[in-house]
């Protein structure tokens, strides 16, 4: 079996390449000419230079492929909607069009839980509810460009399905583990481990080990229903408890100051002027969402894909911290699990 992987040099795409190779796939790694090759070093992949915004290059790359795993997208944190649409939305359309034209058997779109929108803001003391695959986009595009672009890209998947493409969507939550190459300086794990994060706030998030994500992607390829989306997440945890977990694993004191979410939203407009003091691991755009509990249910993925996350978040943090400290020559790069 032959697979095309877009975004192959990134954290997710590189991990998918490794997972496919372990299962005996031949992998064509689609990448830009100037992409960092750290995560592909030593892997038996066929390199293909191109850009998802260039329809001709992705069409050629799709020739002879049995499957396409589309992981390329504009990185989180950008607020340029036009750029996000060009790369994430139109790029996805180009990938899907190529898959249709070349008769690819199945396409896997690596979306994000961000495409599901935002949870309802809850008063203090009210238990947060878990979002599932039925939740839909409900936020202003300007408040979360990345999420909105992912939502629009999922609409492109549905259009391609209506034209006859066998395609499945997976929605990973926050991914942790070795190999997060483009966030080596901005990772919350790095900031905590180096003593650069001095505050926390209320709210919650869902976390998953990168190896559990890969097993979920492969399970979705095998068992996912055409046109459906599957949340790939594991642990729902408050932000403060996650910060404490990272501090404990990395052996540093946890931040003691918890800033009320309302105050962070108030200072959002002037965040650029004070970010050197707070040094939060998010951009000012995401301060719109502070105080919300981004909890998710993975019940559908477990039920329909036969998938089960087996790695702890503690191990993901430990492996990520080790890799950040020694990214070259780490076990991750040699093909070991």
Image (tube, grey):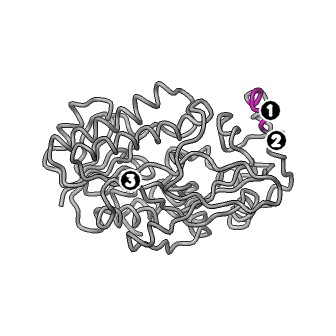
Q: Judging from the image, what secondary structure is the residue with disc 1 in?
A: helix
Query: How far is the residue under mark 3 from the one under mark 1?
Result: 36 Å
| Mark sitting earlier along the chain (2/3) | 3
Query: How far is the residue under mark 2 from the one under mark 3?
Result: 34 Å
- The residue carrying mark 1 is 267
Magenta stretch secondary structure, dominant: helix
Residue 323 or 237: which is nearer the viewer? 237
- The residue carrying mark 2 is 262
Residue 64 is one of the magenta-drawn residues = no
Q: Judging from the image, what secondary structure is the residue with disc 2 in?
A: helix
Dot 2 alpha-carbon crowd within 10 angstroms: few under 14, some 14 to 19, many 20 or more:
some
Q: Nearer the viewer, mark 3 or mark 1?
A: 3
Give how far across and how far down residue 190 sits, in percent.
65, 52
| Mark sitting earlier along the chain (3/1) | 3
Query: How far is the residue under mark 2 from the one under mark 1?
Result: 9 Å
Residue at point 19% right, 37% down? 59
Left or right: residue 124 versus residue 172 is right
> Which corner quadrant of the image does residue 235 belong to?
bottom right
Residue 95 or 299: which is nearer the viewer? 299
| Magenta part of the chain | 265-271
- The residue carrying mark 3 is 169
Looking at the image, do the residues carrying marks 2 and 3 touch, with CB atoms under 8 Å apart? no
| Mark sitting earlier along the chain (2/1) | 2
């Amino acid at each position: 079996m032959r697979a095309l992987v877009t975004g192959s040099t990134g954290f997710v795409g590189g991990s998918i390449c490794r997972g496919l190779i372990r299962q005996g796939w031949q992998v064509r790694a689609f990448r830009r000419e100037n992409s960092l090759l750290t995560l592909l070093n030593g892997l038996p992949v066929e390199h293909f230079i191109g850009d998802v915004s260039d329809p001709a290059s992705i069409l050629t790359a799709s020739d002879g492929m049995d499957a396409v795993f589309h992981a390329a997208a504009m990185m989180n944190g950008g607020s340029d909607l036009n750029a996000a649409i060009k790369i994430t939305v139109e790029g996805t359309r180009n990938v899907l069009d190529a898959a249709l034209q070349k008769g690819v058997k199945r396409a896997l779109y690596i979306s994000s839980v961000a495409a599901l929108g935002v949870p309802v803001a809850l008063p203090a003391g009210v238990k947060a509810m878990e979002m599932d695959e039925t939740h839909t986009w409900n936020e202003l595009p300007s408040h979360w460009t990345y999420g909105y672009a992912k939502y629009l890209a999922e609409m492109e998947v549905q259009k391609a399905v209506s034209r006859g493409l066998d395609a499945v969507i997976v929605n990973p939550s926050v991914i942790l583990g070795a190999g997060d190459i483009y966030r080596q300086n901005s990772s919350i794990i790095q900031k905590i481990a180096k003593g650069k994060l001095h505050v926390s706030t209320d709210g919650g998030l869902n976390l998953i080990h990168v190896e559990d994500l890969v097993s979920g992607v492969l399970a979705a390829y095998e068992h996912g229903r055409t046109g459906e989306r599957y949340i790939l997440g594991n642990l729902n945890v408050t932000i403060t408890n996650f910060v404490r977990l990272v501090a404990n694993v990395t052996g540093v004191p946890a931040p003691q100051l918890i800033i009320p979410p309302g105050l962070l939203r108030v200072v959002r407009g002037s965040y650029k002027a004070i970010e050197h003091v707070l040094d939060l691991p998010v951009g000012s755009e995401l301060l719109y969402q502070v105080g919300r509990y981004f909890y998710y249910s993975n019940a559908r993925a477990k039920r329909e894909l036969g998938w089960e996350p087996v790695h702890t978040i503690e191990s993901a943090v430990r492996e990520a911290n080790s890799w950040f400290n020694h990214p070259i020559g780490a076990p991750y790069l040699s093909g070991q699990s």
